[in-house]
Amino acid sequence: MLDRFLQARHTTRRHFLEKCQMGLAGMFLAEAAGAAPKASAENPLAPKQPHFDPKAKAVIYLHMAGSPTQLELWDPKPTLQKYDGQDCPQELLEGKRFAFIKGVPKLLGTPYQFKKHGQAGTAVSELLPHFSTVVDEAAVIRSMTTDQFNHAPAQLYLHTGNPRLGYASMGSWATYGLGTENQDLPGFVVLVSGNSTPSAGKSLWGSGFLPSVYQGVQCRTQGDPVLYLSDPEGMSRTLRRKTLDAIGDLNRMQEERFGDPETEARIAQYELAYRMQIAAPEVMDISKESDATHTLYGTEPGQVSFANNCLLARRLVENGVRFVQLYHWGWDHHGSSRREDIRYDLPNKARSVDRPMTALIQDLKQRGLLDQTIIVWGGEFGRTPMRENRGGKYTEYVGRDHHPHAFTMWMAGGGIKPGLNYGATDDIGYYVVENKLTPRDLQATILHQLGLDPYKLSYAYQGLDQRLIGPTNEARVVKDLLA
Amino acid sequence: MSGPRALPLLLAALWLVPTVPAEVDFQRQVQPILKKCLPCHGRDEHARQANLRLDSFEHATGKSGGHPGIAPGDAAHSRIVARVQDDKNPMPPGGERLSAAEIDVLKQWIDGGAKYQQHWAFEAPARPEPPTVSQPDWVRNPIDAFVLARLDKAHLKPSVEADRYTLARRLALDLTGLPPEPELVKAFVEDESPEAYEKVVDRLLNSPHYGERWARVWLDLARYADSQGYEKDGLRTIWPYRDWVIRALNANMPFDRFTVLQLAGDLLPVPTEDQLVATGFHRNTMTNTEGGTDDEEFRDAAVKDRVATTGQVWMGLTVGCAQCHSHKYDPISHQEFYQLYAFFNQTADADKPNDEPKLEVSDDVTTLIFRELPADERRETHIHERGSFLSPGALVEPATPAAFEPFPEEFPRNRLGLAKWLVSKRNPLTARVLVNRLWSRLWGIGIVETEEDFGTQGLPPSHPELLDWLATELMRLDWDMKGVLKTMVMSATYRQSSDVTAAMVESDPKNRLLARGARFRLSAEMVRDQALAASGLLNEELYGEPVMPWQPDGIWQVIYSPIRWTTSEGDERYRRSLYTLWRRTSPYPAMTTFDAPSGEVCTVRRISTNTPLQALVTLNDPTLMEAAQRLALAVADDDRERTARTMFERALVRPPTEAEVERVLALQAEARAELAGDRERALELVNFDRVLYTDERTATLVADVREAEEGRGPAAMWRYTTEDPGADWMQPRFKDSKWEKGRSAFGRMFRKESDKEDPNEKLSIATPWESDNLWLRTEIDVDEKELTDFRLYVRAFAHFEAFVNGVAAADSVQETGTHVDYKLTPQAAATVRPGKNVLAVRVFRSRPPESGQHVDIGLTAVRPPRLEAQGGDEVERAAWVVAANVLLNLDETLTRR
């Protein structure tokens, strides 16, 4: 069903017309009586009532683009260890498609040790020594699946609910549904590290068919924190203030003359832009954080790093941003070169996230923000229990291919059950055998925690009430994950 | 003075709402109620519940089998009436209950015989007679009669005609996408002849910029872009298709021919080169070159996109909905989707990385085209169960949906036949959809607001008879697009002033009744093009390769992709926005901020937004600031008031009021006072372009082979070794005198005969390198102090890491067949001092030895700009730059009114 309340706030009037049985004449009457949305005068990002009491106010989504190997980090498999180096059983290969694996590959045990940590006894790899200490705060989900096995479609599926382009991102849906708390900052912020945007590019934080005010705004730690934020060469802040005053005065003269109420909206947007010019660099400047905080996260001001982005995520959420999406590229460990080798590169990669993501949990907790902030961590799919043999040959390097049938994610805060081990895979980690989750289930659960009904949150476009969770009602809010 | 009257609300209510409807209107009253039932009781057999269908009289009454929900003439005994009133378990389930008024409508309709009607848009338009109206002398052509008749009903009056400045700007922006030239405005304002207006219209319709403006409209539909899409999103050449569209529109090619050539130019008996280029329309689908993808999966995605896009563009229907299941609302079944698919399923393209088939149109330029498969390679088309190409169902043949006019026997059952069927004058949708689209670009909103959906889920037209008159007029004129546009802009309706009062806004906020002229924000392209035109920067050259105007650093960061954004040189960066290189995953950010679509899928209508990020673009984007600088330098003279007036007219295309002049002068004085104490800033402002562009002040510190190839001198000499030299090899103090000496490039070429795209091509290797590792060092002589923006240029079929003076400077694991620039890390850049510096690079072989390997490295930096007074007092002129920045940011400047 269309969510009437939310829809009424937006530019399309389809729903309104449906409600109004008298046709156009009636529509004009109702508009005159003030029942229709005034998209221009009303701020579409103003905070809105959720469908029901929310458990969380904000989301920090840590996406590990390229997809980390669950078998080295989260999901120990003694049987796989035992058959390390042997041919993969034929029944596991039949009817499967792989990105690069050819012929009969060999099973690959992990070179890393696992131990159980915390009261929940959660298995965590030696590659994540920091995270092991806070694992009791998280729900580790070893039963994620997807139906896409290439980066771009799998990322799109996870974030927009559809493997094709043109759909709205989860952060767009959240800000469409809830607005945002701080009008001087964007409501949906994207931070990218790892030397590359993720495979699917900016479509991952696009608003699709939703109005473009809901698209993610990429904030950067080098150059302008928001594109075009800084005044041009030669323009000082005092001059900028004077120009804005002149723009305001001239706009008002023109408004008086031509009478268009849009002009008032434009004046407001210029003032907002001016405030954002101050607010965004302030919130993006981590240099004034304490030494203790920098030590906690492992941050270095001025760098582009996952650590800096984690600290920024905390600052943004603290300042009322609704949805902070991090992308950290570089987990595509196929084993086709040294840089893609699970023995040589994976430890570096794990090191680059271990301390910061741990710090994020600790820092949010000590500030009393963890309860109201959902943290999500994971890639777009998993990696095979088999060693990749690109082109049918092994090289000196070791890695794993894309694997949609099983991967691990964790969630923490925002009403997610802490200290939970959820779901399981078979002996070699190929298939999920318990509590299978799809991206749609994840999406439904996140929306639900924000106080949004995932079945109701919709937007009329191309003859359908479009929803993040797709047209069918297969998605479930995973109650087992909720505290 | 005729203006709309602000009626008191109650009075308006009496006029607008009939108290006792004589008869229930099926389309406006009943259909919206039935729509709530159709998801479970409609065409979609998979979703159907209780064996009940309500989408036609025969089904609803049980005459075609299934349960009867309706007893015609007898609401009291109709099952659905009982079910919607059921207290325990009312229909529709889960949602809001039907209101008492809705239930009454339903009962009245059933009692009256439950007559269904064909959806209005599926009936061929009949040519309506223009109605008689209250002010016949206001009517300039039939458009006005239809509009005024509607206003008469609402007891409103049209607005006065806009003044000539406004009209000149409105016409020029609407018809050419550019502001009018000052000389045209002057001539029009002074022209007292009765044909003055028409002369301007004709001149603009005949301007070559007309084709550019309307091509942009069409390219949104064609999802045109200069890249392949998906992960790698590599660049492709398909701009000859874009140029074909511009030429076709400028030549006013009739829309039926325009259609046939794009959908099926290759199927004409002897297609010309141009006709093949035109088929690029549907080659704008995306190609997935990511490793391991199933080409058939993405070929299928492209074909589905072609079906959906064709439905959207020509029929205004959401055909794509039927790819997984029968359309829930419109008469397109799951099977019919794949019958349409069958038309498009015989082309030779197959999601190959090289985008074949292509056509060579001139030296080194090939463009993507359609080619039909030969008879022995034709594909079978099956229904895809649940839309998945991996689940083929029944075999189907090409056919058009049964609800529309039959496919003529004499048409071939291929794309050519389909194209002809679309532009047959019996097709109820094509002409309506096109005139509505043209109308929407002129009024900011269509007669049917949901341009993308003329089906039963779309909004009904505000002026149904006007829409049908325009559609039939277009066909009477044999699809003459310029002709119908001229009719539109010649109307009195179009010429109305867009000035409003609060009462007018309140009574009709979206101007659906057209009691005033339209007012809407300029498109993304117009915002930029107008600023370029106003400042005199605009390069009016037509056609050709896409260009790269300035954009912020770091926008293009796509993994596994070496391509870089390098600002075009000279005038090329001031080309119209239409020519900006468009990469789907990273489109030009200033334009996407103003709602330009990415080009990934067909965009029928851009939804205009108003955000603070737009204010940041127009205030701060250096392109806009450069326009302000050039505008200021072009008009500033000793007479401040004259300068203010001229600048205002250039930016807003009208003379300013006295108050406006005063405000501009006041700002200029404030800016002067501020800048007098800061001449450095003033110099930066008047030299803004020199500060912005670095191409003329870039110095080569380490020459790569391109220097040699372009005759500027030899490539740099390096010290190198292939034996591990120990940990401190990159330090400045390290002694490399025992290393060997050699010029760049290093490597060993290997070229597979079969692979023409081999990145190893065309590189002059000066020093052989065949081992796993290579360590390189060279000295950099720096003679200037204030170098900035150090960039390493590396072409490497290998991986590398680089150090400057021992500090990590750049690294990459991408193989690049061209030279790619890497900005030095700030830490490394900070170590560069006048005198000797050391660049050290370690290179790793990235491929098995038989694949070849190479590396070539250069280093550049940028000298500080030369700041000059620019022909007058820099403080005075810089203050005008500030004023120009203001004028290019006014709401009126950004609005078409």
Image (cartoon, rainbow, N blue to C red):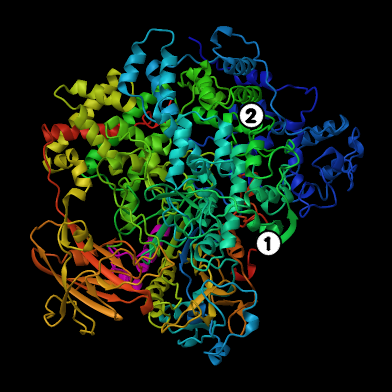
Could you say where residue A178 lies in the image, as x and y percent from the top left? Answer: 53, 51
Say few, some or many: other residues with alpha carbon within 10 Å of mark 1 (under 14 / 14 to 19 / 20 or more).
Answer: few
| Residue for point 44% across, 82% down | A398
Q: Is residue B118 magenta?
A: no
Q: Secondary structure at mark 2?
A: loop
Above or below B619: residue A439: below
Could you say where residue B114 lies in the image, as x and y percent from the top left? Answer: 85, 33
Q: Quadrant of residue B625?
A: top left
- Label for residue A474? 1
Residue bounds of the magenta highlight: A288-317
Main SS type for the magenta part? helix
Instruction: Give whichever of B332, B483 is nearer the camera.
Output: B483
- Callout 2, which amino acid? Pro
Instruction: Give whichever of A295, A457 is nearer the camera.
Output: A457
The residue beneath circle 2 is B461
Say if labels 2 and 1 share a chain.
no
User: Mark 2 belongs to which subunit?
Assistant: B
Residue A370 lies left or right of residue A434; in this view the side is: left
User: Mark 1 belongs to which subunit?
Assistant: A
Residue B74 lies left or right of residue B287; in this view the side is: right
- Callout 1, which amino acid? Glu
- Label for residue B755? none
| Labels 2, 1: front one | 2
Furthest residue toward bottom? A82
Q: Secondary structure at mark 1?
A: loop
